[in-house]
Amino acid sequence: MTGPVPEGRSLEGRASEGLAPEGLAVIDKEAGWTSHDVVARSRGVLGTRKVGHSGTLDPDATGVLVLGVGRVTRLLRFLTALGKEYTGQVVMGAATSTLDSSGDVTATYDMAGVTPAEVVDAAARFVGDIEQIPPMVSAVKVGGRRLHEIAREGGEVERALRPVTVHRFDVTPADEPGVYDVVVACSSGTYVRTLAADLGEALGGGAHLRNLRRTAIGSFTLAEAHPLESPVLLPMVEALRDLPGVVVDEATALDVSHGKPLAAEALGLDPDPAPGSGSGPWPVIGPDGRLLAVYEPHGDRPGRVKPAMVLAPDSPTAGR
């Protein structure tokens, strides 16, 4: 994204101006908290109910959880497709009911003869476009119910294979025998615990995941993450920094703020992009660096774009 990026106001500064808290918070989640727990606690810390997250992180996992605050909650849907990065450990020789260390051991295997080279070769088979079966402890819905709800009742249902992409699956021996440190970069919707279990099965035994830590969601990394009790709000425009943004002049900004469909050229976009490129959505930024709207292709009207969302002006704290 190019163009000016405003610094935004601090929580104290916005409060002094009668404005509700607003922005994007990158949280370093602790183990033992559900994503819902983090949102609920953040509402108290920030003093507003308008808080949401862009994607769940398992209770036992730690690391990056992105929260939208105020109007930024409306932008979170544009972050769900961002790629993810993780670190963790794969424990060979034991399969569990949850595919990670929180579950009960369901089977054990003698995998002492498996060499590190064999583990590396097996992991390489999972790099690229693959298909996974969602674990029963996931939030995927089947028949209108989430799988983890069915699992808590002792049930199990058929799950369809889901296509995902694994960009990186590095494995190196840890200090503990039969344990491997892993680094995974993958598409949204990839289950690292499933990767661990499938890796064990590919080696003729079983395995499970432990110590999962999410290190990045798109460009949002642990380097800018903060503890739950001391969040830092990034400006609204930063929420969509991983999308190709466009900066417009004052005249076009007025049309955009009114939600008008426009010719692609009005936003400086190619009216006839090559297949697979320039497909949007596009954050539209005014000359002052403020995010005005998010535009997308106009479906049945080639060369035209329309607003997927128009951002209203700041609201006073009374509206929270």
Image: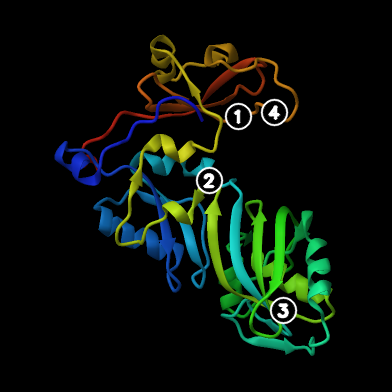
User: How far, Cα to Cα, is label 2 from label 4?
Assistant: 20 Å
| Side (left or right) of 104 relative to 195 | left
Between disc 1 and disc 2, the foreground one is 2
Residue 207, label in figure: 3
* Front disc: 3 or 2: 2
Q: Which residue is mark 2?
A: 219
Q: In the rendered image, which residue does mark 1 sit on?
A: 280
- The secondary structure type at the circle numbered 1 is loop
Query: Label 4 vs label 1: CA separation?
Result: 8 Å
Residue 172 coordinates in the image, percent (x, y): 70, 71
Mark 3 or mark 1, earlier in chain: 3
Residue at image coords 37%, 27%: 290
Q: Which residue is mark 4?
A: 277
Q: Amino acid at mark 1?
A: Gly
Q: Nearer the viewer, mark 4 or mark 1?
A: 4
> Marks 1 and 4: in contact by CB < 8 Å?
no
- Per the image, label 2 sits on a secondary structure element best described as loop
Mark 3 → mark 1, Cα distance in angstroms: 40 Å
Image height check: is 36 above or below 245? Answer: below
Residue 155 lies, in percent from the top left, at 65, 77
- Amino acid identity at mark 3: Ala
Which of label 3 and label 1 is nearer to you?
Answer: 3
Quadrant into which the C terminus falls = top left
Q: With 11 as the anchor, is 256 left or right in this view? A: right
Alpha carbon distance from label 1 to label 2: 18 Å
Marks 3 and 2, the one that precedes in the sequence: 3
Q: Please determine whether, in this image, residue 46 is positioned above or below residue 180.
A: above
Mark earlier in primary sequence (2, 4): 2
**Amino acid beneath label 4:** Ser
Three-letter amino acid code at the position of disc 2: Ser
